[in-house]
Amino acid sequence: MLKKIHHVAVVVRSADTALQFYCDSLGLPVTKDAVIEEQGVRGVLLQCGHSEIELIEPVRPDTGVARFLATKGEGAHHICFETDDVAAELARAEAKGLALIDRKPRTGLAGQIGFLHPRATHGVLIEYAQPPADAAGHPGQGAGWVQDLDHIVVAVSDLEAGVQTYAHNFDLACSQTGELTMLRGRKAILPIGPAFIELAMLSGEAGPLDEFLGNQGEGIYLVALRMDDLPPAVRRLRERGAQVSEPLGAGAAPPRQLAVVAPRSTHGLPLLLIA
Ligand code: CO
């Protein structure tokens, strides 16, 4: 049983440099920072409400993460779902005939982990993690800026197929479908814990999502964080050199504001700030 989105991972050239944005500018506290020798990576977890953002820096050239960086550059790498039994989760996935990278759990940054192959989920690499029993809770950010992970947008070329895949693979049910707010297309909302995954499909007109699908295929399109107050956050990020759009009204009920941080400021991860 999947409990929530544990983290979304970003491959970066240098974790130290990326921390200047994620920790110093965005204000996310570091909860773990370790080199995992057998995987050839340095991983850093940053608390983001009930979820985390994971920065992954390759420390050897002969790893999948190093090859990802060399061919695709910095950017979103995988989504991790938290479970209380990663071995059972992998066994269930195998019984369903899903393509796996790991058939048995191994030790990772977030506890006992295992990966599905991206071809099981329309090009999105999915990790399962079972945090250690004594893992710290997930307190809110208090007076800080980032309250929580709001949602992750995954670009798909066929919305119905996407909804079916997430239902089949992860028992995630679609709570709502509708028009995309800022782009021409349709979306499906898949709640998981306090956050949700938004599958997004363009309606065929040229636009940023269309360009993304053309360039990279289906995959993680953006990550949305819920902020306590947007204008001061935008001001502070700009003072620290980040490229952030003007806050816009999102026209939802209750009224929401949003701003986009450019991927060049976030090390490849399109970031939407929502308040
Ligand atoms: Co991970």
Image (tube, rainbow, N blue to C red):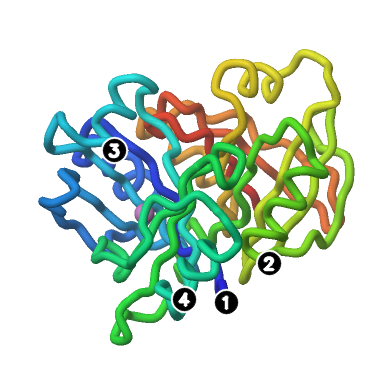
Taking the spot 54% from the left edge, 69% from the top edge, the residue there is 92
| Distance CA(mark 4)–CA(mark 1) | 9 Å
Amino acid marked by disc 4: Ala
Give how far across and how far down residue 52 sits, in percent: 42, 59
State the SS at label 3.
Answer: helix
Amino acid marked by disc 1: Met
| Distance CA(mark 1)–CA(mark 2) | 8 Å
Mark 4 surroundings: few (<14), some (14-19) or many (≥20) residues within 10 A: some
State the SS at label 4.
Answer: helix
Q: Which of 138 and 261 is in front in this view?
A: 138
Taking the spot 28% from the left edge, 44% from the top edge, the residue there is 56
Check disc 3 and report the residue beneath it: 18
Q: In which quarter of the image is residue 174?
A: bottom right
Mark 1 surroundings: few (<14), some (14-19) or many (≥20) residues within 10 A: few
Give how far across and how far down residue 146 sits, in percent: 49, 57
Check disc 2 and report the residue beneath it: 171
Check disc 1 and report the residue beneath it: 1
Looking at the rendering, the quadrant in which ligand 1 lies is bottom left
> Mark 4 or mark 1, which has the lower sequence index?
1
Front of the two marks 1 and 3: 1
Taking the spot 87% from the left edge, 50% from the top edge, the residue there is 177
Task: Specify the label residue 88 is tagged with.
Answer: 4
